[in-house]
Image (cartoon, grey):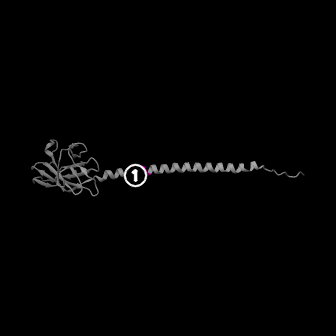
Amino acid sequence: MQPERTRHTSPSERGITGIETAIVLIAFVVVSAVFAFVVLSTGLFSAERGREAVFAGLAKTRGSVTLSGGIIATSDGTQITDLSLAVVLAAGGDSVNLAASGNGRTVLTYIDAGVTDPDLAYTVTPLVGDADDVLEHGELFEIAVDLTQNAQIDLSANETFTLELKPPAGSYLVVRRTIPASIDDTVIDLN
């Protein structure tokens, strides 16, 4: 029987296994770092998009206008000739430009069963606050509509109509009312 030979490695061959292991380990670390960077970047991008969506939603709702009281209708005995409503800012809302003309103006839309006026003429009168057309905190404005300026609008007894106040920024104020059966009174509260 022949004696078993043991292989002796030279000093230069011993380190090769360690270097190969180190290279593989470094490759795993680099790949893991790149993967972690991609995951974190995607997460940060998604979080930023979510934040933008939240702020856009807040901006849309913060400029809200709300009714302060009822809608007052004026009658000539046969039809409604004028409407007026008092508005204030909703709690936490931003200022709203209620100007009836110019850039960045508020639009008032009238809708009933037979007529739609997408840009109804109206006037704004500050009841409480300064004399500009910008509704700010603590101010109360009256919006008056002369329905006789649009020959198509003929609001009479038992008719339902909708007014949509659309400021340049913020949510719409939508008001739906029904005219009572009797419009003999000159002034009618449409609560």
What residue range appears in magenta? 47-54
Q: Residue furthest right?
A: 1
Residue located 52% across and 49% down the image: 37
What kind of element bears circle 1? helix
Decide which of 179, 39 is in the foreground and name it: 39
- The percent position of residue 6, horizontal first and vertical second, equals 82, 52
- Does the magenta segment cover residue 51? yes
Give the main secondary structure of the magenta stretch. helix
Image quarter in which the C terminus is found: bottom left
- The percent position of residue 104, horizontal first and vertical second, equals 25, 44
- Does the magenta segment cover residue 72? no
Q: Residue furthest top?
A: 151
Q: Is residue 101 left or right of residue 92?
A: left
- The percent position of residue 181, horizontal first and vertical second, equals 14, 53
Decide which of 76, 3 is in the foreground and name it: 3
Decide which of 27, 62 is in the foreground and name it: 27
Q: For the residue carrying disc 1, how many other residues have a C-alpha within 10 Å: few (<14), some (14-19), or many (20+)?
A: few
Number of dots carrying numbers: 1
Residue located 28% across and 48% down the image: 169
- Can you identify the residue that label 1 sits on? 51
Residue located 45% across and 50% down the image: 46
Q: Amino acid at mark 1?
A: Arg
Q: Quadrant of residue 128?
A: bottom left
- The percent position of residue 158, horizontal first and vertical second, equals 17, 51
Q: Is residue 42 left or right of residue 186?
A: right
Q: Quadrant of residue 90?
A: bottom left
Q: Quadrant of residue 67?
A: bottom left
Residue located 14% across and 52% down the image: 73
Q: Is residue 3 left or right of residue 113?
A: right
